[in-house]
Amino acid sequence: MTDFTEKTQALRERLAEISLLNSIGAALYWDQATYMPRGGAAWRGKQLAYLTQQAHARFTDPALGKLLDELMPYAERLPADSDEAALIRVTHREYQRAIKVPAELVAAISQHASESYQAWTVARPADDFARMQPYLERTLDLSCRYAECFAPYDHIADPLIDSSDYGMKAADIRAIFADLRAALVPLAQAITAQAPADDTFLHQHYAPELIERFTTDVIKRFGYDFERGRLDRTAHPFAIRLNHGDVRITTRYPKDTLSDPLFSTLHEAGHAMYEQGVKAEYEGTPLAGGTSAGVHESQSRLWENLVGRSYDFWEYFYPLLRSLFPEQLAQIELEQFYRAINKVERSLIRTEADEVTYNLHVMIRFDFELQLLEGSLRIADLPEAWHARYQADLGVRAPDDRDGVLQDVHWFSGLIGGAFQGYTLGNILGAQFYAKALSERPEIAEEIKRGTFSALHSWLQQNIYQHGSKYTAPELIARTVGRLDSAPYINYLRQKYGALYRL
Amino acid sequence: MTDFTEKTQALRERLAEISLLNSIGAALYWDQATYMPRGGAAWRGKQLAYLTQQAHARFTDPALGKLLDELMPYAERLPADSDEAALIRVTHREYQRAIKVPAELVAAISQHASESYQAWTVARPADDFARMQPYLERTLDLSCRYAECFAPYDHIADPLIDSSDYGMKAADIRAIFADLRAALVPLAQAITAQAPADDTFLHQHYAPELIERFTTDVIKRFGYDFERGRLDRTAHPFAIRLNHGDVRITTRYPKDTLSDPLFSTLHEAGHAMYEQGVKAEYEGTPLAGGTSAGVHESQSRLWENLVGRSYDFWEYFYPLLRSLFPEQLAQIELEQFYRAINKVERSLIRTEADEVTYNLHVMIRFDFELQLLEGSLRIADLPEAWHARYQADLGVRAPDDRDGVLQDVHWFSGLIGGAFQGYTLGNILGAQFYAKALSERPEIAEEIKRGTFSALHSWLQQNIYQHGSKYTAPELIARTVGRLDSAPYINYLRQKYGALYRL
């Protein structure tokens, strides 16, 4: 055996163990969010902390670093798109990132995140910002300490952004967001000046079992593989990779809404198909998983919105949905339904926002993240700043903090910084990938009208899914659509909503 | 801090880590048996093997042995019923057992068990004993090698029996079984000479959701705590402790049978209440769990049979069941129902056998285990020996091996030896515990007629559950009922079935 083969083998063995530990954690997390009885919570917390600590200790083992240092020269001599080279390169980069953060800080962040999340589950329903303020202050402090580990940087948010959207900086995102904002604000104004679409019929009882029967059929047709996955119920929908053969999704059925469970399920299926499509050979390595928050979100938003909220899609599926809910939908024509699921309005809740205003919600959070990290906004002033900004940007004011600053889980269960930009990057990228797929496979549009999606799924499989984390987001973008560009997304919104609202 | 406190603390830390690893394995096992998609199987196998190996390596760490050796003199000076002393004593005993078996043999047994189980899931439906023969031969070989680790012994099965029913030997069990057999054979003969009870009405469609509503209500009343547990569906029902706050049960709903899901659920709830009742302070130590196979089975059989198949129980619950299934049960009076669920017959399947013949099934397997280990019976001759013995003991012959030697999972997923005696020990002990409880809390009988069980549950909590593995089975028996004695069980059967069949 050559030195290279031997060392690569040793690397794979170390990574396989770390991957086992992480995948065990994923299985326990899924259980916690779906079926675990309340009594199991305390012990589960210990199990998850233990697994995280074990995986972190192994991943930051100096012996792994030495192995990687020895392998890097080999990797540099291999073709850039060799899987082996990518494995070494990506692991080396992740290792370098991981060792910059002291184990005590990792543990403190994880411990605090868990305590803060527990407090938030009580404080949000009680509209109790005061209770969360000290938690948020510590979260901000930990976030700054995390960022400091990566000094020097251009902006203190950069290390946080980089950890979820590798290669992006605050300045890049500000520029992209400014462009997008310039297009979105007038579009939203023009639409909301008109009479709102009637979507009252979406807000009545729809039996969860029947919604599930419908969404299960749809996502199977999309290409979600139930032999390697499943769909369950939870409080906050998510998709989770347990391993290549087991990528699960979850959804919820809030009272009297059809849209929420419907589009949540399509959204999570988009995430899950990405994970299911990663090459099986990558299992047990850092290549086995989506490459960045933005690219991941591009896949969920593509299926949820570009496909799932399109007229062509519903031309095929609306009769099926209607046959499941004759009482609720008998009087509703396809045109009405299509308008209702694409209703644009100035609203309070990001996750329920329409396509046109959604990014305005994201930008508010992104700007606040930068201001908090810079020190130009204090946690204590955040609730009022939130209300002021919603008034200014969206023309609405939440009656409380529950639907104001307390709404999104991210700041209450992780760090401040890097948590939100991926949503909007995902919208932009999703439109780029979709436009590219349509241009290379013109049959996609016709297939959708017939309720089949094989051309689209196979384009994504070929160009995005299979690569997992082999390519960084910038590399993947370069290979597929050249560069990040919000024009296709803006064109898409203008065309779709221009037609809907006769602008 | 004294030397003792320090060392006990060190012991607890080591045990907590091992316990975390084992409890993680339990959670993954539960998932595998309930919701895991097929695609997850290969990776799950690796995860479970990894966890077992990690836990075993930590439990057989010589540093743990040294700590235990140093602690034993302290333990011997503590009162015998001190929790601290028990922790040291029980861990020391388990450690001494564990280090006798080489890690390679542990790994080989675990690996083979998993492969053999996979093969069995295909071979049993296909009635393919030939396929399983080489697996069984290796299982037997591994079982002998396991037993050899504990030489010298009186009988080669002794180490295997001792590992599930500590303190018992083949010779003891042979003697107990001979006594029991002498009482059961004439009883079974006298009953089966009569016309069989009509139980056809039990074999029709009963909606699983309604059965589940009923059993959920019953086991809640028994004392099973759903805040610290849950009920799901699986292929082979089991109860599993994830931790003190999370003890789950599973059941199944085969087509056209009411008895199977009904009594399986009560049975597993019996196991689960034992685990839920163990002192919370024992969590993270070897004391946290039932003390032996026999005592565990005594708890499941007590609730399933002594309570759940009693006339008093159904006096209260039959009207409730009937109201759920008016179509199926409208014409069936309580007396008929009671006779049907206690139908005695010469049958082929152990798990479906009635109370009178059940132990005859167990004895057949027990005798075969001894013969196989002794070398007086070859695996190749097992199918025919099985048929001959069923003909002799029960007067029936299976039409194939599927319902013959291939029926029980034990030999196909573990070792040969020590796997079956616990079922009959459980029946005997269950009757002893129940008789004792009735004598100390005469209100139990009246409560059952009113559908409440607090006196019985609290007697069991006090005398059995809370102790976990603090006492060995012989110690627990000595503290509660003096000595193992089949008389109460025989009396119970004679009285109940004497009345039913007017003997």
Image (cartoon, coloured by chain):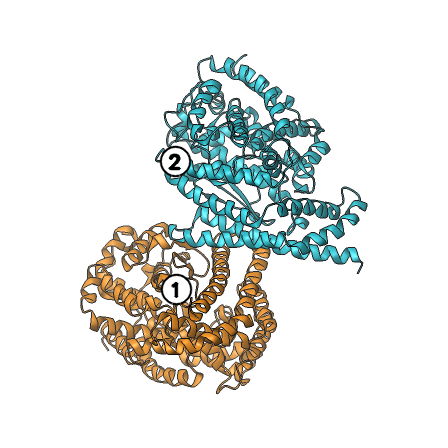
Chain colours: A orange, B cyan
Asked which quadrant contains residue B460, the reply is: top right
Q: Residue at x 60, y 38 (%)?
A: B164
Q: Position of residue B493 (x, y in %)?
A: 57, 21
Amino acid type of disc 2?
Answer: Arg
Residue B242 seen in the current view: yes
Please determine whether, in this image, residue A89 is positioned above or below residue A279.
Answer: below
Please determine whether, in this image, residue B33 is positioned above or below residue A249.
Answer: above
Q: Position of residue A285 (x, y in %)?
A: 43, 65
Asked which quadrant contains residue B485, the reply is: top right
Name the residue nearer the viewer: B255 or B379. Answer: B379
Q: Residue at x 57, y 31 (%)?
A: B421
**Same subunit: marks 2 and 1:** no
Q: Are marks 2 and 1 in contact (CB under 8 Å)?
A: no
Task: From the image, tell me which residue sits under label 2.
Answer: B124
Mark 2 residue crowding within 10 angstroms, few (<14) / some (14–19) / many (20+) = many
Direction front: furthest residue: A1
Amino acid type of disc 1?
Answer: Tyr
Q: Residue at x 54, y 35 (%)?
A: B419
Q: Position of residue A185 (x, y in %)?
A: 34, 81
Task: From the image, tell me which residue sits under label 1.
Answer: A282
Report helix, strand or loop for mark 2: loop
Judging from the image, mark 2 belongs to the subunit labelled B
Asked which quadrant contains residue A473, the reply is: bottom left
Tell me if B313 is positioned left or right of B459 in this view: left
From mark 2 to mark 1, how far is it between C-alphas? 35 Å
Name the residue nearer the viewer: B465 or A54. Answer: A54
